[in-house]
Image: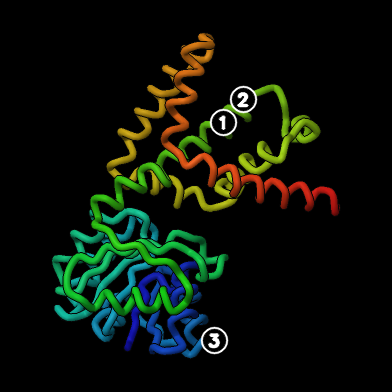
Amino acid sequence: MKIAIVGGAGKFGQHMAQNLEENHQILISDANKEKAEKLARENQWVYGENKEIASEADCVIISVPIKHTVDVIHEVGPHISEDTLITDVTSVKVKPVEAMKEYSDEVLGMHPMYAPTNSIKGQKIVLCPAKGDKWEIMRDFWETKGAETHITDIETHDKAMSIVQGLMHFSELVVAETIRKSEMTGDNIEDYSSPVYQLITDLTARMLNQKSELYGSIQSENPENEEIRQNFIKSAEELRETVTDEEKFSEKFEELGEEFNLADAQSRTDSVIEFLSNDVREK
């Protein structure tokens, strides 16, 4: 197949191209024309403008920042045929998929849930087939690479992401801001840090080591996130009152525990903590 990756010079665009090139011809475009042309020469890919590569491709992958995705779909959509598979790699699905459905009878919303610095094996890929059956080509690609695919609809995806990404990232930002406002610096706290605290703050720091544009878009582009943020704030206020009442706190603690698989969580985190502790001892 001829696979066009719009945004092919970005980190995830390159990642997709490198993993697809073994069995397919790769065409790339990018807002950074010089970088894209250089990558195309180095990897023996084809470089072209967005509309040009989309019109030549059997499959078009939109790999641009979330806030630009719908606009880019509308840019290239009129130039693809009705049987061209068009897909995207963003973490929001409703708006991009609805836009893609205007131009093709073969539409797939695709969300690889990992960073391009990681290998594909063992990663979770959420697929939202919207039209046609060519989407199975991408499912086969991911599964051949060792990924775990999960198939759902776009509405369920965005609701789930409002918790998995929207809530979790927002709570990490609140934690980071609270630490910043405290009188203790990171160096002060290090001597008192348990492995659990270190793990939690490392995950927060990992997020803050990425581009703010990505995480800002994750918060702003998923319409389900506003309600989740409001619920977070409301829950924090309610729990602030509960912690001063021992009986009520105990009841709430037990109630909240029913939402999770506690045994599996204990086992997984014990393994991580043991690894972190060993790493510290070796140093």
Count of all numbered marks drawn on residues in the image: 3
Residue 156 lies, with reference to residue 98, above or below; the image says above
The residue under the point 52% across, 39% down is: 262
Q: Which residue is mark 1?
A: 177
Q: Which residue sits furthest top? A: 245
The residue under the point 32% across, 66% down is: 88
Which numbered dot is residue 42? 3
Q: Earlier in the sequence, mark 3 or mark 1?
A: 3
Among the 4 quarters of the image, the one containing residue 96: bottom left
Q: Residues within 10 Å of mark 3 (few under 14, many from 20)?
A: few
The residue under the point 29% across, 41% down is: 224
Q: Which residue is mark 2?
A: 181
* Of 157 and 206, the residue lying toward us: 157
Task: Identify the element where label 1 is drawn.
Answer: helix
**Amino acid type of the residue that numbered disc 1 sits on in the rendered structure:** Glu
What separation in Å lies between label 2 and label 1 (alpha carbons)?
6 Å
**Amino acid type of the residue that numbered disc 2 sits on in the rendered structure:** Lys
What separation in Å lies between label 3 and label 2 (alpha carbons)?
47 Å
Residue 278: where, in percent of width, then height? Answer: 79, 51
Residue 233: where, in percent of width, then height? Answer: 41, 25
Relative to 133, 188 lies left or right? right
